[in-house]
Amino acid sequence: MSNTPTNPFEAMLAQAHEMAKAFNPALENFSPKGFEALWPTMPKEAMEFWFGKTLNKDGLDAKTRLFLTLAGLTMQGAQADTAVRQTVRHLLEAGAKKQEIVEAIGQMSVFAGIPAVTRALDLAQDAMSDKKEDGA
């Protein structure tokens, strides 16, 4: 019996994995989460400057914009692991409480469904526990 996957998606992933190993053997152990560590969390002041009220005094602050981003990512089924974790890290840096983050994701259950919310909560918990280990 061969080790060839019968599922076309699994076959495509296996082929991509073999190609990556052929191009660069170090890619065999590639971790998207490890790559994520290359992108630091912006300081609160930088987020407020770029995404907050600096350019629009009457507009949304950075924390509110990040909550909207998190809601949108949850609505999409929380498929973008890195984006969800990064948004949660930025929310914590912007001063959001962990309970507020959980509530914002939970609010989306009405619109996105339980599977999307469960996935987003798992990713958020992962990001919040990473932050805790960093001393926050």
Image (spheres, rainbow, N blue to C red):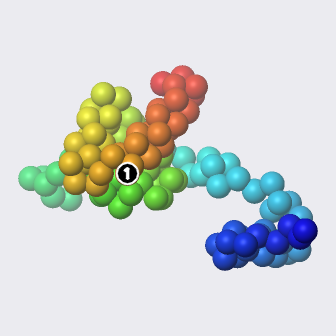
> Would you say residue 28 is visible in this rendering?
yes
Q: Nearer the viewer, residue 66 or 1?
A: 1
For the point 86% across and 67% down, the residue is 3
Count of number-bearing discs: 1
- Name the spot of residue 123 as percent of width and height, x first: 48, 43
Label 1 crowding class (10 Å Cα cut-off): few <14, some 14-19, many 20+?
many
Residue at label 1? 116
For the point 26% across and 35% down, the residue is 103
Q: Is residue 52 left or right of residue 114?
A: left
- Name the spot of residue 70 as percent of width and height, x first: 33, 50
For the point 54% across and 47% down, the residue is 40
- Quadrant of image for the N terminus: bottom right
Q: Is residue 8 above or below residue 42?
A: below
Q: Nearer the viewer, residue 16 or 41?
A: 16
Q: Is residue 50 left or right of residue 20?
A: left
> Element at badge 1?
helix
- Name the spot of residue 120 as percent of width and height, x first: 41, 46
Q: Is residue 119 above or below residue 135?
A: below
- The disc labelled 1 sits on which kind of residue? Ala
Q: Nearer the viewer, residue 58 or 72?
A: 72
